[in-house]
Image (cartoon, helix red, strand yellow):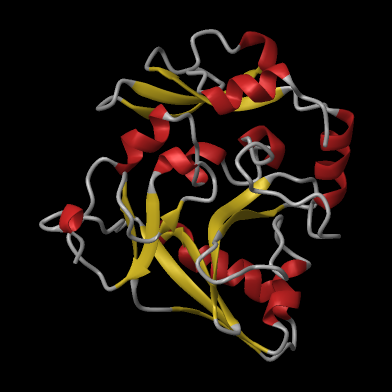
Amino acid sequence: MRAYLRGMATCLTDRALIRLAGEDVRGFLQGLVTNDVATLKAEAPRWAALLTPQGKALFDFLIWADGDAVLLDCEAAEAEALAKRLALYRLRRPITIEPTGGAVHWAAEGTEGVPDPRLAQLGRRWLGAPGAVAAGWTEHRLRLGVTEGVAELGSGETLWLECNAAELGGVSFTKGCYVGQENTARMHYRSTVNRRLVVAPLGEAGKRTRATYPEFGLMVEHRRVEDLGDALRPAWLELALAEPAAE
């Protein structure tokens, strides 16, 4: 074990793994999720989501290559619901969608694993055997302005680009069709992302509040871009607000 990991707890116990395997499993996911699965490489996971037909986030996850199979690194609390949703699209395809053993690990620094595909500053991520529970991940993520999970993104409530998916590598605009693609692409090319999920100092909760974290003095809100107010503005968000033009 590398020196920086000795005695260090790294396991994210609020995450689970779903394994998809079978005939053309990548083609199956390619037509469903927001990121490119066809070109997915080992040790280079991608952030993606399953959307409603209107382009609103239902589930977000990281996709890992596992030989010919694929692993979804997802919220443990939503793993069963995600698997059931994917099974609805499977129809008669010879594809298995099952929970699998192992655990997701994280460290803020070091050389273990690979950089988080959303933002390098989030730290390193890898899959392995279960271990001691990591501390500090949620606060670290929030202070970098990165939101995830149903509690923050909502379930069918927030357009995927309003979740900062374009800025954090959660969508491909060249891969072709997927569920919710039409509205997502239209918003991107017309530069019409009018609201953003942002992290802000804890205040009075209101209609735009998605989640509160009193222990960190933070909250997640869904705000109009002209009314971000006291929201945290990490460099990646400042760049997005300054240069909103489509690629």
Task: From the viewer's side, name the closer residue of 120 and 36.
Answer: 120
Q: Is residue 30 visible?
A: yes
Compare residues 106 and 77 and report the one nearer the observer: 106
* Image spot of residue 206 (x, y percent): 50, 17
Q: Which residue is located at x 68 percent, y 81 percent?
A: 25
Which quadrant of the figure contains the C terminus?
A: top right
**34 relative to 173 in the view: left or right:** left
Residue found at the far left of this picture: 7
Residue 97 placement: quadrant: bottom right
- For this view, does 10 lie left or right of residue 30? left
Expressed as whole percent of the image width and height from the top left, the position of residue 216 reads: 28, 26
- State whether residue 89 appears in this view: no
Give the residue drawn at x 68%, y 91%.
94
Q: Is residue 129 left or right of residue 243?
A: left
The image quarter containing residue 245 is: top right
Is residue 225 left or right of 119 when viewed as pictured? right
Residue at 70% from the left image edge and 44% from the top image edge: 56
Does residue 28 lie above or below 204 as drawn?
Answer: below
Q: Nearer the viewer, residue 122 or 186?
A: 122
Question: Considering the image in quadrants, where does the N terminus appear?
Answer: bottom left
Above or below: residue 93 compared with residue 36: below
Q: How many marks?
A: 0
Provide residue 223's location: percent of width, then percent of height: 61, 19
Q: Position of residue 176 (x, y in %)?
A: 86, 60
Residue appearing at x 26%, y 40% in the figure: 136
